[in-house]
Image (cartoon, rainbow, N blue to C red):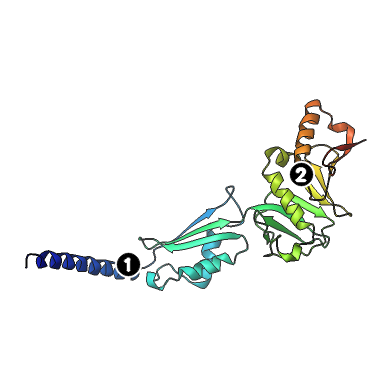
């Protein structure tokens, strides 16, 4: 009997906790949604998305404010928001206060492409193509010239669609420029010439860097940075018209 009483007490206590938890859960599920709270993660203070836009996407399909928590489908809200081309990732959940919490990560544009058909789109840091915006135009590296590829929003640079085009090389070069502060400040434009090779326009000076194809890219960029710093130190840009980087073991300069 002495052993039975503690076991019975523990069992009753555990049952009480379960009942209280169940009651609390039912109370929570029958609580009404008080508000929608949106957080947008991105580089910079402004971008493609805003809180009003995100809330309008939610309310277009479901006016969740004032709705019972048990009736809110957070998975469907995530799916609706994820359809927006400027959304990289989204997470939606309900907090204990009954708020719908929406965390959105915005795409970070890396490159703006212009093809021969005068179509244009952005490429993000993961290589995804997405459309221009009428409300926001970020300052990113432009790439134009003899780009013959059809630009399809939603496609990725690494897909089979672009395997034999100039886009993978442009994307890789743009990423390497973005990751190097000196090169990022030095290069203003990428251009695919009629031979399918890459030319680069500098921020300062009336000359062209002839980069060639995308092979040995790291070596060429190292040569460019070293050469640029050396020439800049002596103020020698004005006498050159073209700097050829396509040979990995030398830099060939054409004077004006």
Helix, strand or loop for disc 2: strand
In the figure, is residue 106 to the left or right of 147?
left
Question: Is residue 220 placed above or below 93 in the rendered structure?
Answer: above
Q: Which residue is mark 1?
A: 28
At 46% from the left and 68% from the top, the residue drawn is: 74
Residue drawn 76% across the image and 44% down it: 188
For marks 1 and 2, give the CA distance. 55 Å
Is residue 144 visible to us here?
Answer: yes
Q: Quadrant of residue 70?
A: bottom left
Q: Position of residue 148 (x, y in %)?
A: 83, 61
The N terminus: image quadrant = bottom left
* Quarter location, residue 126: bottom right
Image check: 72 left or right of 149?
left
In this view, the residue in front, 7 or 178, is: 7
Residue at (68%, 41%) from the top-left corner? 180
Percent x, y of residue 170: 76, 53
Residue at image mark 2: 188
Let me know if residue 141 appears in the view: no
**Badge 2: few (under 14), some or many (20 or more) residues near its Cα, within 10 Å?**
some
Report whether 95 appears left or right of 41. Answer: left
Which numbered disc, 1 or 2, marks the residue that appears first in the sequence?
1
Disc number for residue 38: none
SS at mark 1 in the image = helix
Task: Say which quadrant the C terminus sits in.
Answer: top right
- For residue 125, side relative to residue 52 (left or right): right
Within 10 Å of the Cα at label 1, are there few (<14), some (14-19), or many (20+) other Cα atoms?
some
């Amino acid at each position: 009997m002495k052993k039975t009483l503690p076991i019975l007490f523990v069992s009753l206590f555990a049952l009480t906790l379960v009942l209280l938890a169940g009651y609390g859960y039912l109370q929570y599920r029958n609580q009404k949604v008080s508000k929608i709270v949106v957080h947008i993660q991105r580089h910079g203070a402004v971008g493609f998305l805003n809180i009003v836009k995100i809330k309008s996407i939610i309310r277009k399909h479901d006016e969740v404010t004032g709705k019972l928590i048990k009736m809110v489908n957070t998975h469907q809200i995530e799916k609706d928001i994820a359809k927006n081309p400027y959304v990289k990732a989204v997470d939606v959940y309900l907090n204990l206060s009954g708020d719908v919490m929406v965390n959105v990560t915005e795409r970070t544009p890396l490159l703006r492409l212009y093809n021969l058909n005068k179509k244009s789109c952005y490429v993000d840091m993961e290589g995804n193509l997405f459309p221009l915006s009428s409300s926001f135009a970020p300052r990113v590296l432009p790439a134009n010239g003899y780009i013959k590829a059809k630009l399809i929003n939603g496609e990725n640079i690494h897909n089979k669609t672009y395997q034999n085009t100039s886009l993978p090389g442009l994307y890789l070069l743009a990423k390497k420029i973005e990751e190097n502060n000196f090169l990022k400040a030095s290069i203003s434009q990428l251009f695919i010439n009629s031979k399918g090779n890459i030319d680069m326009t500098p921020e300062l000076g009336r000359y062209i860097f002839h980069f060639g194809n995308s092979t040995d890219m790291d070596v060429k960029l190292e040569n460019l940075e070293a050469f640029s710093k050396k020439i800049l130190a002596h103020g020698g840009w004005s006498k050159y018209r073209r700097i050829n980087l396509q040979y990995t073991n030398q830099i060939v300069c054409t004077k004006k």
